[in-house]
Structures are given as C-alpha cells and as structure tokens.
Amino acid sequence: MLMLPRADIPRVLTGLAARMREGGLLALGMVAGDLDAVEIEFLGVPIAVTAYPTEELSAVVTDAGFDLLQCEEVQVPARGGTETQQFLLARSRRSSIS
C-alpha cells in the first residue's frame, strides 16, 4: 500500500476484502503520516510513498469492509532519529467471491 496513491488504496482494500473469506485476517503495516504519492529516495532509487494518519487509515480499512481488531503505533529507528509506524489487524466482514 505504501507505494500506491491514496486514490487507489480504498479500491484495493475493498477488492481484497471481497476476495477474502468472511472472518479472514488482514495485517497491515505502514508509516504514519500525511503524504500522498510523495517522492523520496529509497536505496538510491526515487519512489513515491503514501502515508495516512493512524485514525484516517483505520477509517479507510473499516470502510473497505474490515472490522478493526487492533491498531498500534510504534516508534522505530530511522535515518537521523525515529519514525512512527502503524500496525493494524482487521477481520474481513465480507464473504469471498465464488
């Protein structure tokens, strides 16, 4: 999800929920922030990254057809300090596609 623009993330999550068995689990980890397809350098290569504030990502996951079971923010080492990453565990509310 990190390298998708925000416009695509709800559609991708909704499609994923629709293809999962009802009750299937989704584990999602992303950097916390407020970015939409912002170019950064990663391992010497420019890439576009997207990040949501934790509350907003939780809402996007819930709106896509998941029940949020757990959401945790963790401070991890990053170049020059630390960054906040978010980890969500959710359960699909939808039945799988036949």
Image: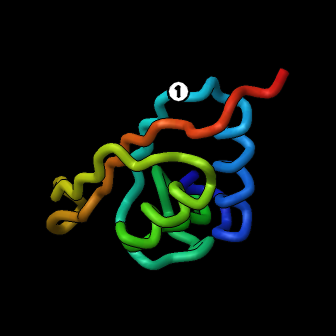
Which one is in front, 58 or 23?
23
Which one is in front, 62 or 44?
62
Residue located beneath label 1 in the image: 24
Q: Residue furthest bottom?
A: 34
Label 1's element? loop
Residue 9 image offset from top left, x and y in percent: 65, 59
Residue 54 image offset from top left, x and y in percent: 35, 67
Q: Is residue 14 left or right of residue 69?
A: right
Kind of residue at disc 1? Gly
Query: Which residue shows up at 29% across the image and 52% down it?
Result: 71
81 is higher (above) or lower (below) than 77: below
Residue 68 image offset from top left, x and y in percent: 40, 49
65 is higher (above) or lower (below) than 63: above
Query: Which residue shows up at 59% across the image and 60% down it?
Result: 63
Which one is in front, 27 or 65?
65
Q: Residues within 10 Å of mark 1 (few under 14, many from 20)?
A: some
Q: Residue furthest right?
A: 98
